[in-house]
Amino acid sequence: MTGSGGLTVAVELATRRRDEAGQALAQVLRRHEHALQQLDQLSSYAADTQGRWSVSAQTHTSPQIVGHYYQFMARLDQTIVLQQGVIDEADRQCQAARKVLMQAEVYLAGLKRLLEQRRQEHARLVARREQKLSDEFASRRRTTVHAASQDKP
């Protein structure tokens, strides 16, 4: 099975690449989850701030504080929009990482299938050789037995 040595190395390398692609996908998924958590925290904070402002705005509030509040809420909204962009980018990275992983798995499966075909072909070749040797031995044995029976008077 001398031809399979290089193929075995290729399978090992493809397995390593597939595993690395899986790890990269897991890392991207963690970043995506973290980005979602941050967006959730920002949204919750904005809603909580809005709720508290509604209660405190019922009392007398100076125009300067109202201005600061609206300015703060505008920046918080900008931050939420930016965080949504981070999530969108993380989604794109997840899709790309999934594609890379899928390609690595398909490539590895193809190499394994080829290796198995080569192993089966080698086994068939060995079986044919053994059968040929067995047939030759049986033929010689039969010829020897037949010759021995002809020599006996």
Image: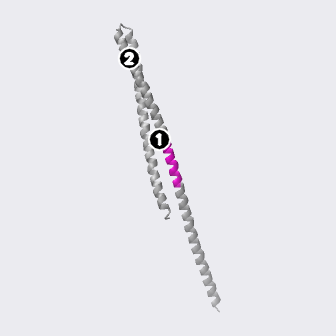
Three-letter amino acid code at the position of disc 2: Gln
Residue 98 within the magenta-colored segment of the rendering = yes
Depth check: 61 or 82 in front? Answer: 82
Depth check: 33 or 82 in front? Answer: 82
Identify the residue at horizontal 61%, vertical 79% (top origin): 139
- Residue at the disc numbered 2: 71
Q: Secondary structure at mark 1?
A: helix
Q: Position of residue 81 (x, y in %)?
A: 44, 25
- Is the stretch drawn in magenta largely helix, strand or loop? helix
Label 1 crowd bin: few (<14), some (14–19), many (20+), radius 10 Å: many
Residue 52 within the magenta-colored segment of the rendering = no
Q: Is residue 33 left or right of residue 121?
A: left
Q: Nearer the viewer, mark 2 or mark 1?
A: 2
Q: Secondary structure at mark 2?
A: helix
Q: Is residue 113 left or right of residue 20?
A: right
* 75 over 4 or under it: above or below: above
Identify the residue at horizontal 47%, vertical 55% (top origin): 10
Depth check: 140 or 29 in front? Answer: 29
> Where are the magenta residues, as a range?
97-112
Mark number, residue 97: 1
| Count of numbered circles in the view | 2
- Please tell me in which quadrant of the rendered image residue 51 appears: top left
Measured in 3D between alpha carbons, the distance from the residue under mark 2 to the one under mark 1, in whole angstroms, is: 39 Å
